[in-house]
Every structure is written in C-alpha cells, then in structure tokens.
Image (tube, rainbow, N blue to C red):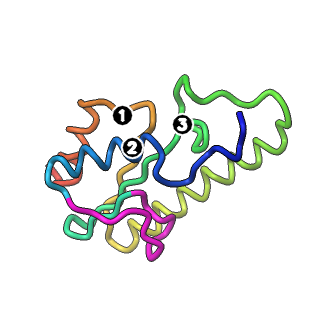
Amino acid sequence: MNMSHIKSKDTKPEIAVRSFLHSKGFRFRKNDKRYPGKPDIIMPKYKTAVYINGCFWHMHDCKNFVWPKSNTDYWTNKLMNNKSRDLKYYNEMKAKGWKVIVVWECEINEDRLNQLINEIKGE
C-alpha cells in the first residue's frame, strides 16, 4: 500500500454516507475544525457529530482489521494512539452535549444508513 495515496477526508465511505444523508434532505457541515477531531459530518440542528472510520486506521474489530506483519512496533503505537485519540474526541463532544455516532467503513450499506437516520433523529 502506498501511504501517500491515503486520504484523510473525502474518502469513499465518507462520500457514500454524505450523499445518502443529503439525498434524504439532511444538511450538514463537513470536517469542521471547530469541533474535537473534526467530525466527518456535523449537524448542529440535531446536535450530532458523525465520525466515519476506516476499519484499519481505527482498529475496528472486524475482518478488515489485520495487524501489519512488518514494522510492528511502529504500527502498534500508531494505531493504539489513533484509538485513544478517537475516544478522547468522542468524550469531549459528549461532554459538550453532542450526540456522537460512529459509522464503520465495513458497515456501510442501506440498512446501516437507514439506521443512521434514526440515530440522528433520536428515534
């Protein structure tokens, strides 16, 4: 994998979720620097932050996450730091009264996206 090709925003999973929400009439801001962790989607109307996480980079417990076999010390440190930083950001947002929703890359399908709408609306 060529690391220079990895994007931090406007990834395929993010675009899929944003397109779906927009098509359902939701309006939002993206990657707003004013909030902890620059949530991928921020919806002030619903006081909701949506983080769309890649399974590898955020250590999701699914088949898409596999520990790298080389340079293991570097990767262990990097990925553990990512995970603890995520938790810190989620807790900061919750402390400010925001609802935090995490959508994992491997989950993105029609059922999960419809469930996301219910989570946003609080149903």
Q: Which class describes the residues within 10 Å of circle 3: few (<14), some (14-19), or many (20+)?
A: some
Q: Are marks 1 and 3 in contact (CB under 8 Å)?
A: no
Q: Secondary structure at mark 1?
A: loop
Q: Residue at x 18, y 47 (%)?
A: 23
Q: Alpha-carbon distance for marks 1 and 2?
A: 7 Å
Q: Alpha-carbon distance for marks 3 and 2?
A: 10 Å
Q: Are marks 1 and 2 in contact (CB under 8 Å)?
A: yes
Return the residue at label 3.
55
Which three-letter amino acid code belongs to the residue tagged 2? Val
Q: Is residue 94 left or right of residue 122?
A: right
Which three-letter amino acid code belongs to the residue tagged 3? Cys
Q: Residue at x 24, y 30 (%)?
A: 111
Return the residue at label 2.
103
Q: Nearer the viewer, residue 22 or 34?
A: 22
Q: Is residue 32 magenta?
A: yes
Return the residue at label 1.
108
Precedes in sequence: disc 1 or disc 2? 2
Disc assigned to residue 1: none
Q: Secondary structure at mark 2?
A: strand
The percent coordinates of residue 13 (x first, y second) are 42, 41
The percent coordinates of residue 58 (x first, y second) are 57, 44
The N terminus lies in quadrant: top right
Q: Secondary structure at mark 3?
A: loop
Indicate the quadrant where residue 46 lies: bottom left
The percent coordinates of residue 117 (x first, y second) are 20, 46
User: Measured along the vertical axis of the image, is residue 115 above or below residue 41?
Assistant: above
State which region is magenta: 27-40
Q: Which class describes the residues within 10 Å of circle 1: few (<14), some (14-19), or many (20+)?
A: some
